Amino acid sequence: MGKQERAVHRLLNLVFALQDADRRGGRMLTPEWIRSRVDGYGDCSADAFHRRLHRDITTLGRAGVPLEQRSSETGGTAYRLLTDRYELPEVSFTPEESAVLGLAGHMGQTSELGVFARSGWTKLAAAGVSRDLSEAPVFTAVNDTHRLDPAILGNLITIIREGLRMSFDYVATPTSEPVRRTMDPWAIVTHQDKLYLIGHDIDRDAPRCFRVLRIAKVYAKRQEITHPQPEEDLQNIVVESLRALHARVDAVLTIPEGIAHELAAVGTKREDGRTEFLDVDRAWLSRTAAGFAPEVIVHEPADVRADVIALLKGAAR
């Protein structure tokens, strides 16, 4: 071990000893205690030890480590770490910042950044730090950041930053076919560990959000956006859009005999030949009715009819 490495090793040991003493009631560490208990100080004469300790205390002070110094009972100087000034304050992040950090952390797990991070703990452990893993949780959180294609995310961020209109394929459910959508994008918002692209949907002429994990084939158009980001909180728009997506509605459809048995089984046939639905999932009704178009016709409500038309236009493109 070189001279510089020995000095770093000794300084780390001294800081850890001061931290431990402060956590055990704020005990002051005397030079005698440091020389006998802290690795790196017991291999020299008394005069050399005092010079080395004085130099190390000065180095720690210049590095910003707050120390209290008092005269000890033996006539020397005792030292104590001021933990309340040394430890960093509690850090909090916005949902957007948390999503970015989570994505970056996941990318680091499988790249050379992960190796670097693990090596950092190895160096601390070698300096004398210990940790107890018996109470550590034995699970790994799995969310959109673990499954997201970085290329898709990179394309979305670039297009948003350039202020361009975009198009992409969107798969509403794992069993549904991709639908081409066109949007003036505003931002990527996180909600309940999921990432959503939010913007103005050109086809429906209204704000919409799409889960990024279900987006593919992202392309920028040679046209700047014409629907700028509103002043309203985008997080609220996402929450309201998701609530509307899972809304339940009453509806009236025309379902010819022998077609769309799964729809007909849920509704009630009226005397006029139309089928009435009470309290059904709006998204399911729209997708299923669109799958049996043009034979199946939605008469009401108007917003479900608009959803079906938009799905059919997207499929036609």
Image: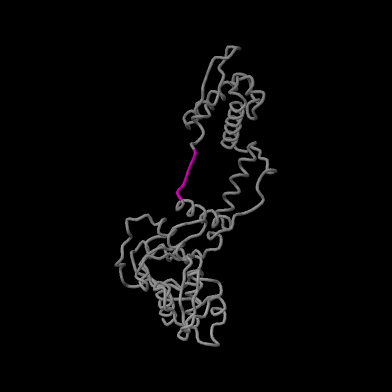
Residue drawn at 60 percent across, 28 percent down: 23
Q: Is residue 207 above or below residue 307?
A: above
Residue drawn at 48 percent across, 36 percent down: 89
Q: Position of residue 219 (x, y in %)?
A: 40, 72
Q: Is residue 224 above or below residue 8?
A: below
Q: Position of residue 215 (x, y in %)?
A: 48, 69
Quadrant that contains the N terminus: top right
* Image label count: 0
Quadrant that contains the C terminus: bottom left
Left or right of residue 204: residue 268? right
Residue 43 colored magenta?
no
Residue drawn at 54 percent across, 57 percent down: 107
Please state the extent of the stretch shown in magenta in the rendering: 90-94
Q: Is residue 213 above or below residue 42?
A: below
Q: Residue 156: which quarter of the image? A: bottom left
The front one of 117 and 211 is: 211
Instruction: Considering the whole magenta stretch, tell me its main secondary structure.
Output: loop
The front one of 243 and 49 is: 243
